[in-house]
Amino acid sequence: MKQVLTALFSILLFTANAQTADEIVQKNIQSMGGLELLSNITTYKITGNVTGNGVDMPLTTQVINGKSFRTDIDVMGQSIVMVYHNGAGWTINPFTGATEATDITGAQLYDLKSQAGLVSNLMDYKNRGHQLELQGTEEVEGVKTYKLRLTAKEDGRVFTYFISQTDFTVVKSVTKREIQGQEIDVENYFSNYKVTDGVKFAFSRSQKVEGQVLQEMHIEKVELNIPLDEAIFKK
């Protein structure tokens, strides 16, 4: 009888955690603008700058919501381009020898795909077949958060999200990436949330590895539902 009760309690606890995780996601969706509004945005454009190694670099990101993503970074007069379009990706990066459009595959392609829309993998985890579990609570830079672990259907990659207990925005996300042949936890921090036409964006973002800041991004302007030429996403 004791074993039966223990098993039953475990099942009930698991169910409660799953329901709680889903409730947190739903509140995150509402905080960011609501699923209907996020889904009905056709295009958006972000302008700002990225700072890395003491260099300030202008950045432009253009997105056809749910379909295409393109980022252009101006580095000392040269352009780094990263594009996702209809399941494929390519890049131009003269600093790595890729002076012409070069295919992107694997984890980097998955990362670009996840940025090609306002409805994130976390928001749409059920429809995309991802697994999600609540792993308790944790304080992140003074903010009390819920800790959610998402396992991606496509390749089994694990993403950990830290959701504010106050306004249900994403404060931090963590995933492993291969850097110089080693798997390392990459931490992304999100802050300075502002609303543009009902949609909330993190205007300040930073990326850290082992506590060291790799780069910081600051958004200056967000434009929604503007004309974009689909040709800019084609290789």
Image: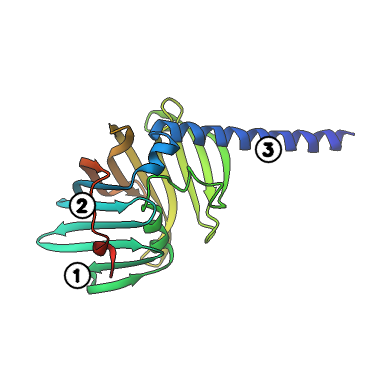
- Mark 1 Cα-neighbour bin, 10 Å: few <14, some 14–19, many ≥20: some
Look at mark 3 in the image and give the residue it sits on. 14
Look at mark 1 in the image and give the residue it sits on. 94
- Mark 3 Cα-neighbour bin, 10 Å: few <14, some 14–19, many ≥20: some
Image location of residue 136, percent across then percent down: 56, 34
Q: In percent of the image, x 29 and y 42: which residue is there?
A: 205
Kind of residue sitting beneath label 2: Thr
The secondary element bearing badge 2 is classed as strand
Q: Looking at the image, which is closer to me, 81 or 4?
A: 81
Look at mark 2 in the image and give the residue it sits on. 60
The residue lying furthest to the right in this view is: 1
Image location of residue 94, percent across then percent down: 19, 70
State the quadrant of the C terminus: bottom left
Whole-angstrom CA distance, mark 3 to mark 1, is: 50 Å
Horizontal side, residue 157 vs residue 4: left or right: left
Q: In percent of the image, x 31 and y 68: which residue is there?
A: 90
Horizontal side, residue 55 vs residue 154: left or right: left
Horizontal side, residue 189 vs residue 159: left or right: left
Would you place residue 185 above or below residue 106 in this image? above
- Mark 2 Cα-neighbour bin, 10 Å: few <14, some 14–19, many ≥20: some
| Marker disc for residue 146 | none
Kind of residue sitting beneath label 1: Pro
Mark earlier in primary sequence (3, 2): 3
The secondary element bearing badge 1 is classed as helix
Mark earlier in primary sequence (3, 1): 3
